[in-house]
Image (cartoon, coloured by chain):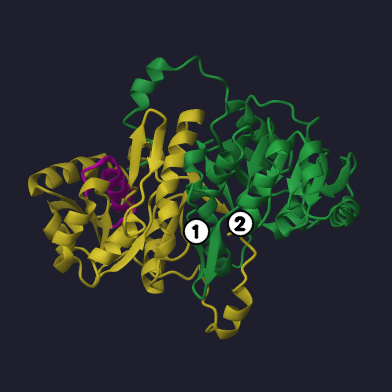
Chain colours: A green, B yellow
Amino acid sequence: MSADQNPNAGSETAAKPPRRDPFDLPDVSGLTVGILGGTGPQGRGLAFRLAAAGQRVVIGSRKAERAQEVAAGVAAAITTDGRGELTGEDNAACAAASDLVIVAVPWEGHRDLLLSLEEELAGKIVVDCVNPLGFDKQGAYALRPEEGSAAQQAAAVLPRSRVTAAFHHLSAVLLADPDVERIDTDVLVLGDDRAATDTVQALAGRIPGMRGVYAGRLRNAHQVEALVANLISVNRRYRAHAGLRVTDV
Amino acid sequence: MSADQNPNAGSETAAKPPRRDPFDLPDVSGLTVGILGGTGPQGRGLAFRLAAAGQRVVIGSRKAERAQEVAAGVAAAITTDGRGELTGEDNAACAAASDLVIVAVPWEGHRDLLLSLEEELAGKIVVDCVNPLGFDKQGAYALRPEEGSAAQQAAAVLPRSRVTAAFHHLSAVLLADPDVERIDTDVLVLGDDRAATDTVQALAGRIPGMRGVYAGRLRNAHQVEALVANLISVNRRYRAHAGLRVTDV
């Protein structure tokens, strides 16, 4: 079965509203982006790139002091002009202060943290970038959350939020390296709310080299999360910091 | 969690044998490639590309006559010099005649067909490119085989074969189009047998534009198979024939 064989494509086309240009994305430069778990390598790297691109960023952590410390360190590493404001808060204050919240916490604490922030995250775009993985002597392998994926777990726990999934495949090493000017990768964005996925795609596109590409509904998030196990194998075999590009788009 | 964070990387490095160049791949030009289900769109497309690249190809089908008919049609479409021999056989004769066998059958008949060819496929490299998918009004979604993936099912059914997984993400439309000279995509190759995955990578690399990239063990095949559901969403949104490139490799 190849990707261009879809038994339902014909029947759906007939019922579709007029097609919207998939490259026509909103201006997101005014949004405040919160990053829960923003003191970890992935969160720090995203904070660095987004603030360097001019986005207002709030790093969240269990302790506000720690978040502020990391925010100051990340801000100091940004040498480009037009840096966005970068602050640190505890996770609840981070969620409350932000228009869009990236979830970059370890899988282990994922469910409990989101459950505790249900109120603060209500009505907001939540971007899950968590990859549930296990490790043994043979390397990484995918875990299968009960809900199907980390993103679907987030959606189950946050019924009032607009949950999307994105930013799974980024190298924290490349994100954090100020000598790396462009991140050569596409960001696969998943979700069931078109305005929300458009917004997340636009946000990814703010980072030089990155492009946000819509890649399906939340029910197809598991394989995107799990693919990090494969990229770990790629990185080990080729001594690389692999990313992904979608061709013909 | 990003792909460059591997808690086991340190300890494993110490025990590793000297590293082999991952780009040093064997010469596979002398191998005969069988394609089970070679009369379907994906199989036909692969037969076309591999034979055009000079590979000897045997198309397999339930009926030898049908396979021969398709082989003749595919051969007639090849205009490049140096075309490999292209013949058709029933599936059992196809498996018996080939050094390496690509499994391109529909998921529904996957297990039974392989079970019936256990003898013919013993000792051979088997390349599973089957994507177990379901379809409903919302599009495609991943099915989860009991064994974990189609490739792991193949390995369970074929204990004497060297089972790999590859060629999941190719557009049958692009493969079959003689005006498309290069297929702009990487082929993720999975398997537990290094010599086998090296061989499959080399085979992918015979097709202009393609590159075979090692992407992990068979236990991580599910997400690679399932990712076709996402590419179907990409293709629908962008009216594309999407492929994947691995960056930094």
Q: Amino acid at mark 2?
A: Trp
Residue B85: tell me if it is visible.
no
Residue A47 in picture, x, y percent from top left: 78, 48
Q: Residue at x 36, y 51 (%)?
A: B144
Judged by its main secondary structure, the magenta piece is helix
Residue type for callout 1? Leu
Tell which circle, 2 or 1, labels the residue nearer the N-terminal end.
Answer: 2
> Is residue B109 in view?
yes
Q: Is residue A149 left or right of residue B203?
A: right
Q: Is residue B16 magenta?
A: no
**Left or right placement of residue A178 versus residue A8 in this view:** right
Residue at point 21%, 48% (across, down): B37
**Which mark is drawn over residue A107?**
2
Magenta span of residues: B37-55
Judging by the rendered image, the residue that carries numbered circle 1 is A143
CB atoms at circles 2 and 1 under 8 Å apart?
yes
